[in-house]
Image: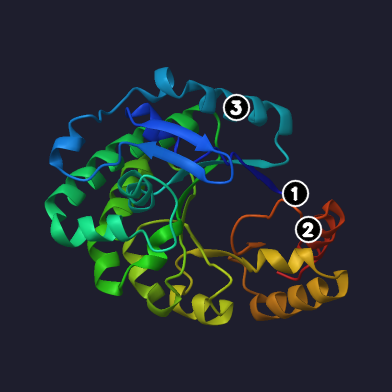
Amino acid sequence: MDAAIIFSDILIPIAAMGMDLTFAKNHGPQLNPPIRNREDLARLSTFNPEKETGVVGEIVGRVRDAVGDQQAVIGFAGAPFTLLCYMVEGQGSRNFAEAKKLLFTQPDVAHELLDMLSDVLCEYLAMQIRAGADAVQLFDTWTSLLSPEDFDTFAAPYARKIMEFLAPYDVPRIYFPRGIGSYLERSLTVPCEVLGIDWMQDLGKAIACVGQERCVQGNIDPTILLGSMDAMERRMEEMLAQTEGYPGHIVNLGHGILPPTRPEMVGRFVELAQSAKV
């Protein structure tokens, strides 16, 4: 591999803010009680990341020492809107109805929570940079729930605030807004060096949209690696043909790797990526 991402759970900062976080068997994370009004916000607080989440920084530093100068280490955090979804819903969901209800019935509360999360994540990612991260990624899984206008209102401004805060650290910043292929151009308001592209978007069109100003990262469907080697190789060839000669493409999956993926599939994926013409 060319880089290792410190893929810590996105809910770690939420627990440090004061929410009760548990993981129920077969049901994923449970956050109780959920945030549903301004009074609930009073239970939350910002925190010192070195003191409350120092284990994340420690791991970044240990991996930095272990991989040496040959590979990059990438810090990681969930973006404010995605974290809001879990905090308001209280758990995972297909449509996060309670979270979206808050946006439209109590937008002032939503903005107050998003602003608080932005402040927390600025310091949380800065801590990871100080610990040795060569780059940082802001992972916005649930932007797929938003209309273009709502993305402009509830997601982009807060991702932008974090990226602007991190600019003086002079490390590459990666923003991954999942599921917004139909209005990808709106993500360009978020300053970053790399834009993550999920597998539901045409990579060639994404590059045409992004232009030469920033790199793209992605976008093979992770489930391709669960199939045959031949099918995966064909899909890789198709993707690499789209970006041949384009120096700003970081070959990657279009979302996280799945647990049943066989190591030999990953090995071949990396081999094909590293042999591509750039």
Judged left or right of residue 35, residue 76 is: right
- Asked whether residue 155 is in view, the answer is no
Q: Which residue is mark 3?
A: 59
* CA gap, disc 1 and disc 2: 7 Å
Location of the C terminus (image quadrant)? bottom right
Residue drawn at (71%, 50%) of the image: 259
Residue visible at 17% across and 44% down in the picture: 37
Closer to the N terminus: mark 3 or mark 1? 1
Does 251 sit above or below residue 204?
Answer: above
Q: Amino acid at mark 1?
A: Met
Q: Are marks 1 and 2 in contact (CB under 8 Å)?
A: yes
| Pointer 1 residue | 1
| Residue 229, placed above or below residue 86 | below
- The answer to whether the residue labelled 3 contacts the one labelled 1, judged by CB atoms less than 8 Å apart, is no
Question: Which badge, 2 or 3, is on the more N-terminal residue?
Answer: 3
Image disc number at residue 270:
2
Which of these two is toward me, 104 or 159?
Answer: 104
Tag shown at residue 116: none
Name the secondary structure under disc 2.
helix
Residue at figure coordinates x 48%, y 71% from the top left: 212
1 to 52, vertically: above or below: below
Of residue 92 and residue 57, the one placed in the foreground of this image is: 92
Q: For the residues marked 2 and 3, what is the alpha-carbon distance in whole angstroms?
A: 24 Å
For label 1, the crowd category at 10 Å Cα-Cα, with few meaning under 14, some 14 to 19 and many 20 or more, is few
Question: Would you say 190 lies left or right of 3 here?
Answer: left
Rounded to the nearest angstrom, the CA distance separating label 3 from label 1 is: 18 Å
